[in-house]
Image (cartoon, helix red, strand yellow):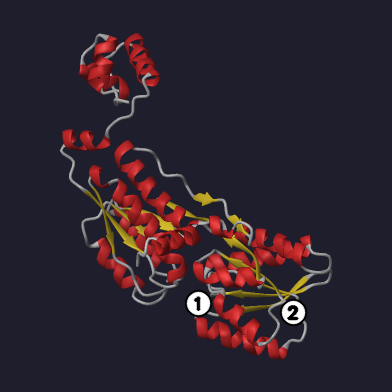
Amino acid sequence: MKRISIKDIARLANVSRGTVDRALHQRGNISEQTRNLIMRIAAEKNYKPNPAARMLVMGRAPVSIGVCIPKEIRLFFDQVRDGIMEGAHRFESMGIKANYSPFERYGQGEHERLKEMLGSKIKALIMAPGVDPSLSALIGEAEEKKIHVVCVAGDVEGSVRSTAVCSDPELNGRCAAELMAKFVRPGARIVIFTGMLVHPVHSKEVSSFTEAFEQFADGGKVIEVIENHESEEEAFQKCSALLKRVRRIDGMYISTVNCLPVCTALNAAGRAEKVKLVTTDVFPEMVPWFERGTILASVYQRPYMQGQTAISLVVDHVFSGRPFPPTCYLNPLIVLRSNLRMFREISHQKTRKELNLN
């Protein structure tokens, strides 16, 4: 079906193209009757503006968007990156260009990389905030320079960032607690593995799970919280030591994507079938642990959608003037063995293998 243009609307309304443009963009020098006629025709004909053409008419330069997120943990942040970069690719015809400049991991090169990006000619910055106390000041510096900051996979409370796109950590913890309560017996004893309690996302997930589990579970309680600092080796060693030290553990909640070393430690100790496991997110390496029944459920934070939403919010603001929402929380999804292969991270991997792609 042919896309209707401003010229077509002008012909149908028997007015000039300039009059149509004024009506569509809420400018003056037009009667209310004519404006209503034009808006009615545009709605009936399903008119959609062409941002690329409008950008050329306005003489607008290409829009560069900085992307500063960690490489690790790759199982999560690779998906965030793909959502951002593939989203940016769809908007290339509008002059959108994503400048991907990652740092190694939280606390390693984060501040320096952000400073570099603020010195470049970017219109917006998509960043994944860690625990660096200087981040709030950097965000303030960016916004003063008219660089819109969109936090993804977390937030910097008290900062002046334009918006944040993430999964609500308190809701994540509560969902995990309700799931766990359905898997364990009354009076269950639970251990939580998290990344860093100084990270606000991790601390909120832990506190929310702890509070909710006592509500959902009959006499159940969290007996220990273990930080693994997103290190696979540290997670394996601490889990192995825990299993030797504590005889009765009914369930474990892994509040970050770093679940594989915990699965491996449980299997090595011969307790994989006895300890109920609720994890976070999903990726191909988790499939065998789901199929064995080691992982019973996972709370999916939709990292790809977080990245895709972040870039879309920037584009909508730059080209349409749409205001940023204060915060954009994505509803988490629940991964079970039954629906495991329906999720993008698993189905996408399968498709690539079938096509012999690397």
Q: Residue at x 27, y 51 (%)?
A: 123
Q: Is residue 155 visible?
A: no
- From the top left corner, tell me how far across and down residue 147 is, in percent: 30, 53
The local crowd at label 2, few if under 14, some if 14 to 19, many if 20 or more residues have their Cα within 10 Å, is: some
Of the 4 image quadrants, the one containing the C terminus is bottom left
Instruction: Tell which of 124 and 335 is nearer to you.
Output: 335
Query: Residue at label 2?
Result: 249
Q: Residue at x 36, y 75 (%)?
A: 104
Q: Residue at x 51, y 85 (%)?
A: 233
- From the top left corner, tell me how far across and down residue 154 is, in percent: 48, 61
Q: Considering only vertical position in the picture, is 230 above or below 174?
A: below
Left or right position of 205 against 9: right
The local crowd at label 1, few if under 14, some if 14 to 19, many if 20 or more residues have their Cα within 10 Å, is: many
Q: Which mark is residue 13?
A: none
Q: Residue at x 15, y 38 (%)?
A: 59
Q: Is residue 187 visible?
A: yes
Q: Considering only vertical position in the picture, is 148 above or below 237?
A: above
Of the image marks 1 and 2, the number of the one nearer the N terminus? 1
- From the top left corner, tell me how far across and down residue 132 is, in percent: 42, 71
- CA–CA distance in space, label 1 to label 2: 22 Å
- From the top left corner, tell me how far across and down residue 52 is, in percent: 23, 38
Of the 4 image quadrants, the one containing the N terminus is top left
Query: Residue at label 1?
Result: 230
Left or right position of 33 against 50: right
Instruction: Tell which of 357 and 188 is nearer to you.
Output: 357
Kind of residue indicated by mark 1: Glu
Kind of residue indicated by mark 2: Ile
